[in-house]
Image: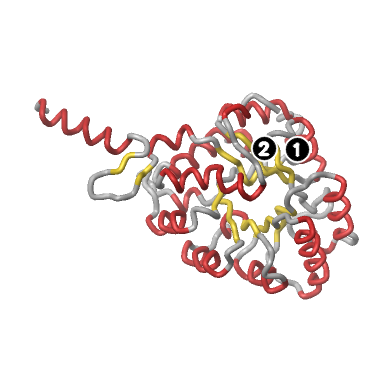
């Protein structure tokens, strides 16, 4: 390699990896390695009963600190897990009310007699700032009174619903009230980018967390899927990152989960990456994320 070739190689490397740099022929200000330094709001965290002993609250906060996660939106099965974390670190945990217990969960929670009253009681007793994450695999007409009561509670409290579903239940919920704010868990989980785009175009108060979509957003060589990149840029004000610690394996893999989110954020513009990393959550939950949060509770 000649000196000139070496210089050109080094120059190209710097152009590609420098944070917030505009590359010739590309008018997008890509954040690049600057994504590694972004504070994050984890918008999809669970603290289930099985995690309480192996991952006590002080360990969870250390994991957040070590990975640059300033705050997290937490729901748990049962709700006591969320309250445990929130009581330990009220400055760092944003609690939401998950309507599950040891007997009723993703497949049957709407059939739990008294679940509506239970949700209202917990949301009244504790400072829950969302209802969910709950699963709606299909729309059951028999559940409509329950859905209406949950929607009325959410609107009264001015808090979002966090919904794990395909696109049809989202359409259904908005048909009951267009004034809702919904966080679409996993950005629809298996819905293609085209459907997510259509839904976000249709509903201006529809947000989405990207947990479990990392393999759709990234491509094998470490690049980004162009359809997803365009979607994330277009609706940068309504996406948020998430880890989804639904089983202990996810806690054990937390470092990797956060790192892979930073990988795809690195392909976005600086403005969009910041919005998705933490600014959208700041706006949605009325928080302020700052470096002084790390190491605090």
Decide which of 36, 261 is in the foreground and name it.
36
N-term-proximal mark, 1 vs 2 = 1
Residue at horizontal 39 percent and vertical 35 percent from the top: 33
- State the image coordinates of residue 131 (x, y, percent, origin top left): 75, 54
Decide which of 160, 99 is in the foreground and name it.
160
Quarter of the image where one finds residue 165? bottom right
Marks 1 and 2, Cα distance to the nearest angstrom? 7 Å
Give the number of the disc on residue 91. none
Q: Is residue 218 left or right of residue 283?
A: left
Quarter of the image where one finds residue 145? bottom right
Quarter of the image where one finds residue 168? bottom right
- State the image coordinates of residue 42 (x, y, percent, origin top left): 61, 42
Number of other residues with Cα within 10 Å of mark 1, as a class: few under 14, some 14 to 19, many 20 or more: few
Quick one: quadrant of the N terminus? top left
* CB atoms of marks 1 and 2 within 8 Å: yes
Residue at horizontal 64 percent and vertical 46 percent from the top: 44
Q: Is residue 250 left or right of residue 268?
A: right
- State the image coordinates of residue 46 (x, y, percent, origin top left): 69, 43
Disc 1 designates what residue? 50
Number of other residues with Cα within 10 Å of mark 2, as a class: few under 14, some 14 to 19, many 20 or more: some
- State the image coordinates of residue 26 (x, y, percent, origin top left): 27, 50
Decide which of 295, 138 is in the foreground and name it.
295
Q: Is residue 14 left or right of residue 104?
A: left
Disc 2 designates what residue? 248
Disc 1, SS: helix
């Amino acid at each position: 390699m000649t000196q000139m070739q070496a210089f050109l190689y080094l120059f190209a490397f710097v152009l590609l990896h420098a944070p917030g740099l505009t590359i010739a022929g590309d008018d997008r200000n890509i954040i690049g390695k600057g994504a590694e330094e972004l504070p994050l709001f984890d918008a999809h965290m669970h603290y289930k009963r099985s995690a309480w002993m192996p991952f006590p609250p002080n360990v969870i906060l250390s994991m957040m600190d070590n990975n640059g996660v300033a705050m997290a939106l937490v729901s748990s099965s049962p709700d006591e897990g969320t309250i445990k974390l929130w009581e330990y670190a009220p400055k760092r945990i944003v609690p939401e009310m998950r309507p599950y217990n040891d007997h009723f969960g993703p497949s049957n929670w709407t059939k739990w007699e008294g679940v509506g009253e239970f949700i209202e009681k917990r949301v009244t007793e504790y400072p829950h700032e969302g209802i969910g994450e709950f699963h709606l695999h299909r729309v059951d007409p028999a559940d409509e009174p329950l859905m209406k009561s949950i929607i009325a509670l959410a609107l009264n409290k001015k808090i979002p619903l966090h919904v794990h579903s395909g696109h049809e239940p989202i359409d259904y919920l908005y048909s009951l009230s267009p004034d809702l704010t919904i966080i679409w868990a996993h950005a629809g989980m298996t819905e293609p980018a085209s459907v997510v785009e259509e839904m976000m175009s249709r509903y201006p108060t529809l947000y989405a967390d990207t947990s479990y979509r990392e393999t759709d957003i990234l491509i094998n060589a470490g690049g980004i899927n162009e359809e997803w990149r365009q979607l994330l840029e277009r609706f940068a004000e309504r996406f948020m990152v998430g880890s989804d610690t639904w089983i202990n394996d996810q806690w054990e893999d937390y470092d990797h989960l956060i790192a892979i989110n930073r990988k795809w954020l690195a392909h976005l513009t600086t403005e969009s990456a910041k919005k998705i990393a933490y600014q959208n959550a700041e706006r949605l939950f009325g928080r302020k994320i700052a470096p002084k949060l790390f190491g605090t509770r």
